[in-house]
Amino acid sequence: MTITHETIFTDVKAIRKTSPLVHNITNFVVMNNTANALLALGASPVMAHAENEVADMCGIAGALVINIGTLSDPWIAAMIKAAQAAEHKGIPMVLDPVGAGATPYRTDTARELIHRFRPAIIRGNGSEILALGDPGAVTKGVDSASKADQALDTARALHREHGSTVCISGETDFIVHSDAVIRIENGHAMMPRVTGLGCTASALCGAFAAVNPNPVQAAAHAMAVMGIAGEMAGETADGPGSFQVRFLDALYRISGSDIQQRFKA
């Protein structure tokens, strides 16, 4: 499948035109960052976690993003109920298995969600993706202890078993699907120094999946925009603090010419 600067910007324009509602069940650490990133790109974020309303929220959303970063039993119940509602409505679900491999609790939760609901997109770092297929894989807290390319075989196996497009983020991002592996080479060295940018990538996958029914394109487009915005932010940032602000600005002003000039795959 070909990913070009034209296909990427077509989806960016669609997000800005339709402002799809992206329902996030995400973690306490990143709610503000994630919501601001979605708004900056042009999507409409909602952070609803109560089991009483998640099904209704999915009823009006264009995509569901489940992020297991700060788990609790009530949140897991809400995730399952939301996933059931998304499946019933036929909207795409993105799963971010944050910290899979760090504890059995979160690894088992991620695996249950994948087995029961077959997410359209699974996005994680190398260690998290490895942990979904290998009980012995180790994650350093929520940070990756493995390079992205080390998880390619596991990603392929997840795709074969569940049909999900698997996105492995790292210095190079890999999008694994049935035909091939797409590599996205954009990004900036400061990005791992800012908490929650991986979670932001998953949320942006939700925004792109809400306007593009092809999960492979949606994931690749989201990661390209993430990386390009990171490059734009890094050119003037003095450190991680100013990088966060400039990253949001870059998402807001990213243009077709920016993508054409910077996209590397």
Image: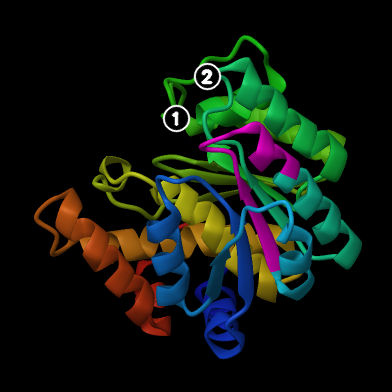
Q: How much space separates mark 2 and mark 1, taking CA atoms?
A: 7 Å
Mark 1 — residue? Answer: 142
From the viewer's side, name the closer residue of 170 and 99: 99
Start-end of magenta stretch: 63-77
Q: Is residue 53 visible?
A: yes
From the viewer's side, name the closer residue of 140 and 7: 140
Q: Position of residue 236 (x, y in %)?
A: 13, 64
Identify which residue is drawn at 41% across, 50% down: 30
Q: Residue furthest front?
A: 52
From the viewer's side, name the closer residue of 258 and 196: 196
Question: Mark 1 or mark 2, which is nearer the start of the sequence?
Answer: 2
Query: Which picture quadrant has residue 218?
Result: bottom right
From the viewer's side, name the closer residue of 184 and 134: 134
Identify which residue is drawn at 17% across, 62% down: 235
Mark 1 Cα within 10 Å, few/some/many (few <14, many 20+)?
Answer: some
Q: Is residue 152 left or right of residue 243?
A: right
Please check the rendered image and state whether residue 216 is part of the magenta-colored stretch, yes or no. no
Q: Position of residue 232 (x, y in %)?
A: 26, 66
Whether label 2 touches label 1, CB < 8 Å: yes
Mark 2 — residue? Answer: 102
Kindly identify the amino acid type of the residue bearing the numbered disc 2.
Answer: Ala
Identify which residue is drawn at 55% across, 53% down: 202
Q: Is residue 263 visible?
A: no
